[in-house]
Amino acid sequence: FNNKAESEFIYKGAFNNCKSLKKITLPDSSFIMEDKVFNDCINLETICFNENTNILNITGGIFNNCDQLSNFIVDDNNKHYQNSNSNLLLSKDGSKVIIAAKNYEYGDYTLPNSVTIIGDSAFNCIDSLNSLVINNNIKEIGVSAFENCINLHTVKLLNVDTVIKDSAFKDCINLITFDNIQNLPIINNNVFENTGFTSLIINSEKIGDGAFKNMKDLTEVTINSNIIGDYAFSDNNNL
């Protein structure tokens, strides 16, 4: 986008599969960007935010399958965003992770202390994430926040009152340990669908639709819940 360019709306898939695209400087304005605008831009490395850049509905899904994304550059005068070590795009006050760069070695990762909210699809499809500490400050984990993090095996949740939204850990196929899962007050829809647990104790008041669906290694469950949603444990062939 030209310097000081202003846009109002960028539609879904507008730059889909632009394989030679390496760097984007976003419009210097407030605008709406639909999901998967830069889907499959497999060589995209850097995204630049001008002084007035503000994506009104920003989620990690905008940059779906951008596996080389490693750097966010934010103008110091931008009122909406900041970056943390270049690999995290944060809200200006640092309280919300909006997008995590995919081409970064997360390994055994602890979220920054300033963070209280993990945005929708923020860490979606990050292969380098092995284990995760979700500290006491985290109040909310967004929809599909860690979906399809296929090498994530351990999550340490310190605050059981953290709201975990739909599909947050869906398709984390190697997730086998989740501290305090037995103490979660509510498990929302599809949160742990297609994960790797072998046994579970669940004391949640409510288990949402499809919450533990399609778990091929699950063989034992102890349930103390008043509400069990549609297809909550469906397609678990070893249960």
Image: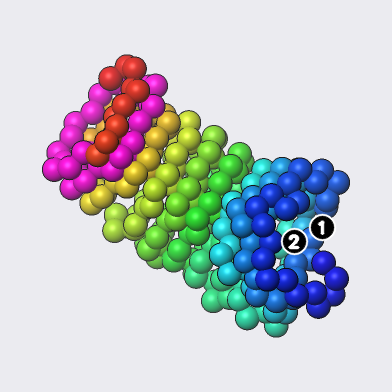
Element at label 1: strand
Residue in the picture at 35% in, 31% down: 213
Q: Position of residue 202 (x, y in %)?
A: 22, 39
In the shown orientation, is residue 237 left or right of residue 78? left
Residue 68 visible in rendering? no
Residue in the picture at 67% in, 43% down: 65
In the shown orientation, is residue 96 left or right of residue 188? right
* Mark carried by residue 47: 2
Among the two numbered marks 1 and 2 on one chain, the one whose residue lies closer to the N terminus: 1
Asked if the stretch drawn in magenta spans residue 36, the answer is no
**Pointer 1 residue:** 23
Compared to residue 73, the image places residue 147 above or below, namely above
Residue range in magenta is 202-228
Residue in the picture at 45% in, 39% down: 170
In the shown orientation, is residue 233 left or right of residue 59? left
| Quadrant occupied by the C terminus | top left
Q: As shown in the figure, which amino acid type bears the numbered disc 1?
A: Lys
Element at label 2: strand
Task: Say whether marks 1 and 2 touch (CB < 8 Å).
Answer: yes
* Mark carried by residue 215: none
User: CA–CA distance between discs 1 and 2?
Assistant: 6 Å
Asked if the stretch drawn in magenta spans residue 218, the answer is yes
Q: As shown in the figure, which amino acid type bears the numbered disc 2?
A: Ile
> What kind of secondary structure does the magenta stretch mostly adopt?
loop
Q: Position of residue 121 (x, y in %)?
A: 53, 51
Q: Position of residue 56 (x, y in %)?
A: 58, 69
Compared to residue 104, the image places residue 115 above or below, namely below
